[in-house]
């Protein structure tokens, strides 16, 4: 146990619940002890597991069990019979400080009143480290937990908050939005042009199907005059025969002069 406070280091929590962490008081293989201030102004001693111990379900359960047993003893729920029935390997309740506040989540911690020169929250880190058979004094070979090398404080996961947009991200988003609107405008104009052209084009009128029936030629209303045949004059009546061959002449003989 160290009563001399040392400055906080990188990775130490600034707050544990409603308590403001001010300095380091003690560092153990299973966790850290800090000097804090309560909302009412009084000094408190805060114990928190290391990240390796918090990841180990058994080590985390031993720490939380010690806190619950100490709180139950202070409230009178656990009496002499309850302490006698405590399983081996449980928290040592003798001389445990008063529990003011605690958190039994994935990154558990406990807060007790800070009294210089007296045991503080580091008492709750003692049951986390086990060795031997735990029958009275430690017997048998000791072992080193696998998580002992990870000695960073186990901090509760901060609530995920959406980071505010920076000026560069705002400009990028505005430019992307303007580009999308421009593309939509161009596509709309092209669609209107195509649809307007289709509407303006005159479609050929489709004629109804018809059946062609030929009509006879028209007949004249009055009969046309026909020329009467005139008799041809005979040779005797004309007086002189026309020069030429007669039907009875021989074409091979020539007529005498």
Image (cartoon, grey):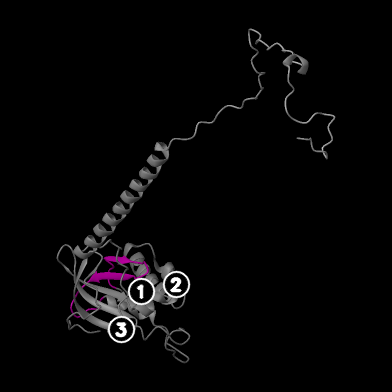
Q: Would you name the residue on which mark 2 appears?
A: 86
In the picture, residue 152 is in which quadrant? bottom left
* Residue furthest to the bottom: 141
- Height in image: 65 above or below 139? above
Determine whether, in the image, residue 253 is placed left or right of residue 147: right
- 62 above or below 189? below
Q: Measured from the top left, where is residue 137 in percent x and y? A: 42, 87
Q: Quadrant of residue 201?
A: top left
Quadrant of the frame with the C terminus: top right
Q: Is residue 136 left or right of residue 161?
A: right
Q: Name the image quarter holding the N terminus.
A: bottom left
Q: Nearer the viewer, residue 225 or 63?
A: 225
Circle 2/circle 3 CB separation < 8 Å: no
Q: Tell me the distance, in whole angstroms, between the alpha carbons under discs 3 and 1.
A: 19 Å
Task: Name the residue that disc number 1 marks.
Answer: 93
Q: Earlier in the sequence, mark 2 or mark 1?
A: 2
Q: In percent of the image, x 46 and y 70: which residue is there?
A: 85
Give the residues in magenta.
Answer: 97-120
Name the residue carrying label 3: 28
Q: Secondary structure at mark 3?
A: strand
Instruction: Label 1, secondary structure: give it.
Output: loop
User: Looking at the image, which residue is at 50% across and 31% down?
Assistant: 205
The residue positioned 31% from the left and 49% from the top of the image is 185
Q: State the residue in front, 115 or 80.
A: 115
Do tag 2 and tag 1 residues touch (Cβ < 8 Å)? yes
Depth check: 167 or 39 in front?
167
């Amino acid at each position: 146990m160290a009563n001399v406070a040392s400055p906080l280091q990188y990775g130490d929590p600034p707050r544990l619940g409603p308590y403001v962490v001010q300095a380091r008081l003690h560092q153990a293989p299973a966790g850290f002890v800090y000097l804090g201030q309560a909302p009412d102004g009084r000094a408190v001693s805060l114990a928190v597991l290391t990240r390796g111990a918090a990841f180990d379900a058994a080590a985390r359960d031993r720490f939380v069990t010690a806190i619950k047993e100490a709180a139950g003893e202070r409230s009178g729920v656990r009496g002499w019979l309850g302490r006698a029935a405590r399983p081996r390997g449980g928290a040592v309740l003798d001389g445990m400080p008063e529990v003011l506040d605690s958190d039994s989540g994935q990154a558990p911690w406990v807060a007790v009143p800070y009294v210089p020169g007296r045991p503080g929250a580091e008492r709750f880190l003692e049951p986390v480290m086990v060795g031997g058979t735990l029958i009275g004094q430690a017997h048998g070979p000791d072992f080193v937990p696998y998580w002992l090398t990870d000695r960073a404080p186990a901090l509760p996961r901060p609530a995920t908050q959406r980071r505010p947009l920076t000026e560069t991200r705002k400009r990028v988003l505005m430019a992307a939005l303007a580009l999308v609107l421009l593309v939509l405008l161009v596509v709309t104009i092209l669609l209107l042009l195509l649809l307007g052209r289709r509407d303006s084009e005159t479609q050929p009128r489709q004629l109804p199907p018809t059946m062609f029936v030929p009509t006879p030629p028209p007949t004249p209303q009055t009969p046309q005059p026909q020329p009467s045949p005139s008799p041809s004059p005979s040779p005797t009546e004309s007086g002189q025969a026309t020069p030429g061959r007669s039907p009875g002449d021989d074409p091979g003989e020539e007529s005498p002069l």
